[in-house]
Image: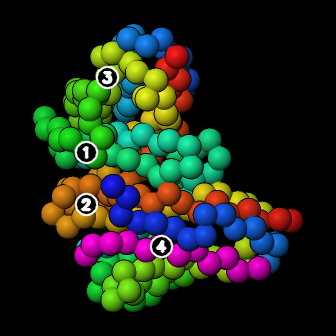
Amino acid sequence: SQQGEEDPQALSIQEGENATMNCSYKTSINNLQWYRQNSGRGLVHLILIRSNEREKHSGRLRVTLDTSKKSSSLLITASRAADTASYFCATDEGSARQLTFGSGTQLTVLP
Amino acid sequence: NAGVTQTPKFQVLKTGQSMTLQCAQDMNHNSMYWYRQDPGMGLRLIYYSASEGTTDKGEVPNGYNVSRLNKREFSLRLESAAPSQTSVYFCASSGGLAIDDEQFFGPGTRLTVL
């Protein structure tokens, strides 16, 4: 079962613009993580936000979490061509020691 | 530090053949994981090992077995490969015992079963 679902599935923007990706989930969570995957590579952890946090920043990344709506968003500001990748949200499932990944958003940043 | 390494990078099998995917990490992590990623989808957990000597099933364990050989190594075995197991397989590790620990991923093994 997929807990997190990203929206949109694909996003194409110009360099310098901001990119926003959304993630929705179904059950209660303790935390939500965002990962990035370059084509043909493994995933790289970007940021984690806990259920008692509403917003978190890391460099050009801003993550928000709305537990009442069971949704999160990842904002990448001043995007670069090197940001082109797939972005996945991942949620824990309470007591189960498992991360459940969404199907991802494919971001293309055009130079 | 090599991080998480996986071998082989690519493999083609015929239906019914067996093989073992190898994974090793040099970060002294307690927990290790095996995922599969199908086209256009996120990762699905096959098996994980919270600590040396323990293994547990994930979301899609059928058709697979695992061995946590020691703290560094975690292997995934396909006893009788099926076309439905064509996928990209990722190994990951994390340092602590908490599920919210950051996971570090290997580069993946692309497996095709004919």
- Given the image, on which type of amino acid does mark 4 rest? Cys
> Disc number at residue B99?
2
Image point 38% across, 47% down: which residue?
A: B44
Q: Chain of mark 2?
A: B
Disc 2 is placed on an element classified as loop
Q: Disc 4 vs disc 2: which is toward the camera?
A: 4
Compute the Cα span from label 3 to label 4: 33 Å
User: Per the image, is A27 magenta?
Assistant: yes
Q: Disc 2 vs disc 3: which is toward the camera?
A: 3
Co-location on one chain, circles 2 and 3: yes
Q: Which residue is mark 3?
A: B77
Mark sitting earlier along the chain (1/2) = 1
Query: Quick one: label 1, few (<14), some, or many (20+) residues within 10 Å?
Result: many
Q: Which residue is mark 4?
A: A23
Q: Chain of mark 1?
A: B
Question: Residue B21 appears in which quarter of the rendering?
Answer: top left
> Disc number at residue B58?
1
